Amino acid sequence: MLGRRAINLFSGFDWWLLASVFLLSCFGLAALYSVDLGRPDSNMLDFKKQIIFFVIGLLLFFLAGRANYSFFRFLAGSLYIVSLVLLVGLLFFGSVIHGTRGWFVIGGLSFQPVELAKLSVVLILALLTSREARSFKTLGFFLKSFVLVLLPSLLIIAQPDFGSVLVLWFIWFTVIILAGVRRRKELILQIGAICRSIHARFFLFKDYQKERFLTFLDPARDPLNRGYNVTQSMIAVGSGNFFGRGLGFGSQSQLRFLPETHTDFIFAVIGEELGFVGSFFVVGLFGLLFFRLFRIMQTARDDFSLFTIIGLAALLFFQFLVNVGMNIGLLPVTGITLPFMSAGGSSFLISFLLIGLAQSIYRAR
């Protein structure tokens, strides 16, 4: 009787989707365990905290997967407003970490509202498209969606956190393009992107952010300062060869030559200690994840579920692409974490919640 109830409880789940994020999380936990081994003063704190986040993330996944996805449609507007209020509160009460005022720290626990903002933007854009299904190609829909992304972007720029701003605009751009905007609006998008880039280059970017881009173009111009991170990351990935040095035996990560090993450069730890085989397996798991999201997209029942999957797939894909790209020197360092693998409760839990939402849509097919 209990077995039958358990089967009914989890019936209709996409187990390949769950398997991909579960294994990615295990790779991340293994890398964090290895990194903590090389830091005797850490008491394995990052690894222990990530274990707790992993358990909570699985719980969120199953709860969201069992819920009706229309519940998220009902919450979309409220969640968007709450995220804006939290982003405003950060400007006055947020804690500064690595030069960014992006965290609320209470009793040793930290929360990053920008991760909630990413989820809320996915949902609010999906809600807008579902309500204006006959207006995808109108200027009104274009402007409404633009403003919905612009408001949190301005608050996030004030932190400043340009990496997260890029994530929001990539979500918007993907939704707008797949919604079917006309070519005239595509031209407006391209001109707007060029103007924003020029404006950011001269008025928004700080000196260290400009240096990051110049270092990306030529890491050797300042290998001991601005180019240090990306240089050490490429050395770590390259030294892993085919099978890697083994967990706990990476010279760059264990001897602390490689910075931010538990967040920004965790893929470099995988490349050094598990080699090409481990890196290929991680990329393959992400490929399986995006393939399953694409299949769920094909079975979506309505516009809200369709554009929710499009938005969350765009969010996860952009973060994966940028993080791996900066680890191997193909993209500038932006501070964007690797989904399901980088340490950090806010990003980790929101990623699992997104996949749970995808499961809910899959079950409703």
Image: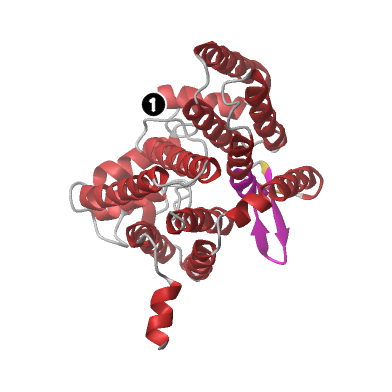
> Residue most toward the left?
242
In this rendering, would 297 be left or right of 203?
Answer: left
To which residue does mark 1 refer? 220
Say what amino acid the circle numbered 1 marks: Ala
In this rendering, would 155 be left or right of 20?
Answer: right
Which image quadrant: the C terminus? bottom left
Residue 68, given in percent of the width and then of the height, sits at 55, 60
Is residue 105 one of those drawn in magenta? yes
Q: Which residues are magenta?
A: 101-120
Q: Residue at x 57, y 21 (%)?
A: 137
Residue 277, given in percent of the width and then of the height, sits at 21, 51
Residue 52 vs 143, above or below: the answer is: below
Residue 328, given in percent of the width and then of the height, sits at 34, 37
**Quadrant in the picture for residue 167:** top right
Residue 120, given in percent of the width and then of the height, sits at 63, 46
The residue closer to the viewer here, 82 or 165, is 82
